[in-house]
Amino acid sequence: MAALLTISGLTKRFDGLVANSDINMEIDAGQIVGLIGPNGAGKTTLFNCIAGYYPPSSGHIVFRGENIVGLTPELIAARGIARTFQIVRVFGSLTVLENVMVGAMLHTKSVAAAATKALDILRFVGLARSTSRVASAITVAEQKRLEVARGLALDPSLIILDEVMAGLNAVEVKAAVELVKRIRDRGIACLVVEHVMEGIMPIADRMVVLDYGKKIAEGTPSEIAADPAVIAAYLGA
């Protein structure tokens, strides 16, 4: 059975800077894959290439059997890839419910249907009590959940989570971990960039490690934790 997402030979250059170099990786349906590496390793650049924000300089990104290189972010979202952002990007002047409705409107022109779907998703992510609040007035942890909810409203097969646990306290990290697991239990694959190792390591099926734009390791969390190249990349040994 073919992988949900296959990345092969992906390279992204910005003038003389090589942000990603010959990246190869796969994600299967319903799988949690952690993407880790030091700051500047090229993780967010890879996310942006997958989601259509950056065109790769070379290589292929095949999603559900289709090469999606060259498609706009909107077309990629319509095909089933949702994403969140490292720096939260909610529509601050809209309500929590309206934010999620924006995502839901991708697949329906009915405002009522979008509202019903959005409310169901907000219950799922634990924001049902905040539907009428203005998005700019909720906490950062809640805004991160709101971004996830808006992504889920797109009916994705794959959701890309960019540091969804960053800046959260221990209780909030635990809640975020549980949410990612419940998303996976819905059959949605999760590609998670994360610096909070205690959040991603226990739940990931596989880990991919980048350093200076190159993939230096891939394996189970236990394999990655013991890999000398990974330890050197993080500790500078």
Image: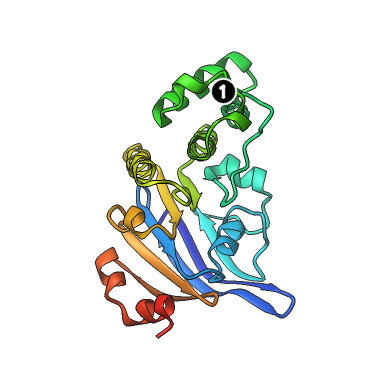
Figure coloring: rainbow
- Which quarter of the picture shows residue 100? top right
Q: Residue at x 35, y 55 (%)?
A: 200
Residue density around tag 1, few if under 14, some if 14–19, many if 20 or more, within 10 Å: many
190 or 108: which is nearer to us?
Answer: 190
| 206 up-or-down from 145: above or below | below
- Is disc 1 placed on a helix, strand or loop? helix
Task: Please identify the quadrant where the C terminus is shown.
Answer: bottom left
Q: Position of residue 231 (x, y in %)?
A: 35, 78
In the picture, the quarter occupied by the N terminus is bottom left
For label 1, the residue is 97
Q: Where 102 falls versus 188 (above or below)?
A: above
Q: Position of residue 40 (x, y in %)?
A: 57, 70
Residue 119, image x, y percentages:
49, 20
Q: Residue at x 72, y 80 (%)?
A: 16
Decide which of 166, 119 is in the foreground and name it.
166
Residue, x 35% and y 47% (percent of image)? 170
Residue 141 showing in the rendered view? yes
In the rendered structure, the answer to whether residue 229 lies left or right of residue 18 reads: left
